[in-house]
Image (cartoon, rainbow, N blue to C red):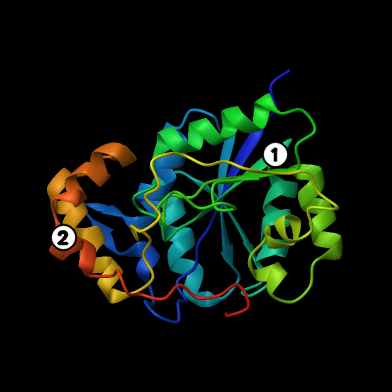
Amino acid sequence: MTDRIVGIVQARMGSSRLPGKVLRPLAGRSVLGRVVRAAQDSGVLADLVVATSSDSSDDAVVAECDRLGVAWHRGPVDDVLTRFVGALDAHPADAVMRFTADCPLLDPEIVSLVASVYRAVPGLDYASTSIARTLPRGLDVEIVRADALRTVDRLATDHHRVHVTSYAYAHPELFRVLGVTLTPDRSQLRLTLDTARDWDLVRAVVEHFGDVSVPLAKLADWLDGQPALRALNADVRQKRLEER
């Protein structure tokens, strides 16, 4: 029997560097809407739910979910792990694919690939493309077995509760963890949305390609010829796990 996979997208309006980024418009669709579409287009999810916070600022996220026809779950602002387990309780599954709403260039083909790898390895607790990074930031995909996520919820403290799955890959002695690497190495590209400079690059990509999910190879080939665009956010520092 094939594992039932639920996709959970974490999304909230609060952001230290780019507030409200998840509802910014891109070619007539919100950033969150693009992430939801890419996850659904992968064809591997039995269900999809947006995990947002109970803070009143996230009423706007709930309104967008309703507009998109997507389920939502509300939980603590900073304890994202509790949010995920609550969403899983409401949408039971054998495994959870975790997405973040600041990845509007997510590639459905990579989502599908990671699900296939996970299903091909019996007894796996966690698989991710970010353990040995070859993908650009903003295209990573991870999947965790539901029972493993509940174990993490019992054990994790501090920043591990913000980053949901980090306790699992920080403790490979407790969890069966697999890194998925795709060649060629395109990790020097930054395609996530965390700063104003990231926004300038993402917006330029969407203006060129339109309201579609773009396969990574096609996007990377185009960016190869856009050095000024790649330079926009090349020196943006990614926050460390311990940072909020």
Report whether 203 appears left or right of 75.
Answer: left
The quadrant the N terminus occupies is top right
Q: Position of residue 160 (x, y in %)?
A: 71, 68
**Contact? badges 2 and 1 (CB < 8 Å):** no
Question: Helix, strand, or loop for circle 1?
Answer: strand
**Of the residues shown, which amino acid type is indicated by label 1?**
Ala
* Residue to which mark 2 is pinned: 227
**Of the residues shown, which amino acid type is indicated by label 2?**
Pro
Q: Position of residue 80 (x, y in %)?
A: 65, 66
Number of the front mark, 2 or 1: 2
Q: Residue at x 25, y 59 (%)?
A: 202
Q: Residue at x 65, y 33 (%)?
A: 118
Q: Residue at x 49, y 45 (%)?
A: 70
The disc at residue 237 is none
* Residue to which mark 1 is pinned: 95
Residue 21 visible in the snapshot: yes
Report whether 155 appears left or right of 190.
Answer: right
Question: Helix, strand, or loop for circle 2?
Answer: helix
Residue 46 visible in the snapshot: no
Q: Position of residue 232 (x, y in %)?
A: 22, 70
Q: Residue at x 49, y 37 (%)?
A: 111
Q: Is residue 183 above or below residue 208?
A: above
